Amino acid sequence: MTGVSEPIGVLPAVVAEEQRDFSVRIRRNAEYVVIPLIALAASVVLFSLFLIAIGKSPLTFFALVERGGFGTAFSLQNTLQRSAPLILTALAVAIPARLGLIMIGGEGALVMGGFAAAVSAIPLLGHVPPLPTLCLMALVGVFVGAGWVGIAGLLRYARGVNETIASLLLTYIGIATMNFFVEGSFRDISNPNKPSTKPIGEAYMVGKIPGTDVHWGFAVGIAVAIALHILMTRTTFGFAARMTGGSMRAAQAQGLPVGKLIIACTMIAGGCAGLAGFFEVAAIQGRANASLIAGYGFTGILVSFLARHNAIAIIFVAILFGGIVASGGLVQRRMDMPDATVLLLQGLTFVVLLVSETLYGRFKIFQVAGAADRT
Amino acid sequence: MNQIPVLIVLVAMLGGALRVSTPFMFVALGECLTEKSGRVNLGLEGTLVLGAMCAYAVSYHSGSPWFGTLAAGGAGAALGALHGYICKLPRVNDIAIGIAMMLFGTGLAFFFGKPYIQPTAPRLGSIGLGDWTGNPQLASALQINSLLIVGILGAVLLNWAFTNTRWGLIVRTTGDSAAAAKAMGISVDLVRFLATTAGGFLAGVGGAFLSLYYPGSWNQGLSSGQGLMAVALVIFARWNPLRCVLAALLFGAAGALGPALQSVGITQGYYFFNAAPYILTLLIMIGSSGSKHAMRDAPSELSITK
């Protein structure tokens, strides 16, 4: 960190050096903002061309996305509501990514965490006041999610099992497990329409942030993102994790506890996704059922990559994609387009974004002499 | 008393293995070819779904399921080519691109597939290998689709090509050492591009089987991870096309466990048995990933086993 507290009697040359250093950092870091923005713009252009090709108006489309996602106070609050699980599932991708692991098990951890939270509340309803019940549910959600993704981390460390495939397989297993219990032993018999667990009831639901229609999950998501950002950038743990991400072998040679780091980071990731599941159950659905499988885990992957696995950037990207997801229904009705439109837009953005990776280091403006050692 | 249901379950599993295994087989063969050249395509799940949609749509419009199958292969090859092209750009991660292609392929299929959920398209026919037995259950279990035979022949051909032809040698060299391939004057990027495209073609054909034969209709829940499991299956098969066929049959049998038990009245753990193939895949990955024996056969350039 440069120029934070200036000791007395510092030589002018050093100050100048530090100021130059600061501008160098700005210029170098600008690359990590500009290139994802280029990618985003390019995917908007490509998607517009696609819409023109199938005879739809891109202007109408993006106007509807704007209106359905951000235009009115109601739609904005809906967007923030949807961005809460996206922040958490994106963090579930971002934290292992710092270690160089591509984990995509967020959807499974969300489903398992939400289901476990809903089940843990059943014996307490009516006996224990709402606040302790919710705290316990949140803890259960976090720990089940952490354990779920932690399995993939453990397998990666102990057996060298590819973490990407393992985490996605665990997602399918998690969804099947929830279906198994929701159709079977935990099914609420009084609800014949959709297999679900017993509802936790209005009194036990997570409340809204005062003055808004947005539940507390959004605030908690932001708090977790900030906390994890501090953990990953300002602590020894974060430093060790990033070093392992740079080169796992070098980290091992340095004597860093690589295995513990992998398991800790994957468990943090799973905990985030499990927390998202808890909020989906306790603030939106009120019970665990197939509605939990809403694709938040998969959209979170894209959010994390677009934010370059930076926890603070994730908050903003998650709000953007929360808006796109929220406007899906409006676009579907007004433009007579399938509900998969949003999925297609996401897939296209993801591909274009990864292609843009190749642009790093190609623009002279971001390259500053003598700054190669800084990232 | 107990023996009859057990027999029925076993026959149903045999039938299931022969029916369900074909998409696994095609995707695994495609992935095997791609990985032999030193690149991983995790996006074959998306390819499978897009292939299924294209096959159904083209079969519906043209009236010929074989045109549909070809179209599915073509769509798969296009996605594979896109993957192959993007991966050759510097600094691009082939695993991340695979995830993106999975979302993209699924998105494309769901977007254009919406109008085809209702109508019925002409399907691929089957060959009754078990008709002579006179046992209706065995006969229906041995109803074999011609794509299964194509897949097995394809595996034999691929295996022969890997070991006996110049092309096979080029692919294997590229997969084992890019530097050696370059020294031989081979364009590594071109070989991997072609191998990924051909792999995508095979995976697309696997998708055609899903929508045109079994389950035999197009809907959004058609594939749930088969494409991904096939990628794991290649590791289990140790990058050998013939072992890919055997592994696919094993997976087919595991996938048929739930429906087979349901057919004799055991419906209790239906969802649990649905998870059987995923659990089997995970166990297989745990078993084969750690072992030196399995990893010896891995192409050395592969990012997935490093």
Image (cartoon, rainbow, N blue to C red):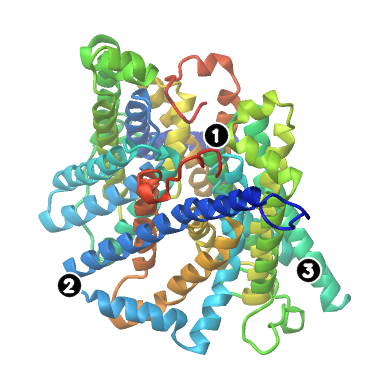
- The amino acid sitting under disc 3 is Ala
Q: Depth check: give the residue in front, A223 or B264.
A: A223
- The amino acid sitting under disc 2 is Gly
Is residue A190 visible in the rendered image? The answer is no
Residue A294 location in percent, x, y?
A: 51, 65
Quadrant housing residue B190: top left
Secondary structure of residue under mark 3? helix
Q: Depth check: give the residue in front, A229 or A3.
A: A3
| Residue under the image location 62 percent in, 48 percent down | A13
Q: Give the chain letter at badge 3.
A: A
Q: Are marks 3 and 2 on the same chain?
A: yes
| Residue under the image location 30 percent in, 16 percent down | B181
Quarter of the image for the C terminus of chain A: give it.
top right
List the single residue furthest toward the top.
B164
Mark 3 or mark 1, earlier in chain? 3
Q: Depth check: give the residue in front, B302 or B164.
A: B302
Q: Above or below — where is A167 with respect to B297? A: below
Q: Are marks 1 and 2 on the same chain?
A: yes
Mark 3 or mark 2, earlier in chain? 2
Q: Which mark is residue A55?
A: 2
Secondary structure of residue under mark 2? loop
Residue B72 location in percent, x, y?
A: 23, 46
Q: Give the chain letter at badge 2.
A: A
Residue A213 location in percent, x, y?
A: 62, 86
Is residue B43 visible in the rendered image? The answer is yes
- The amino acid sitting under disc 1 is Asn
Q: Circle 1 sits on which residue?
A: A162
Q: Circle 3 sits on which residue?
A: A121
With B81 as the anchor, is B16 left or right in this view? right
Q: CA distance from mark 3 to mark 1?
A: 35 Å
Q: Give the chain letter at badge 1.
A: A
Q: Are marks 3 and 1 on the same chain?
A: yes
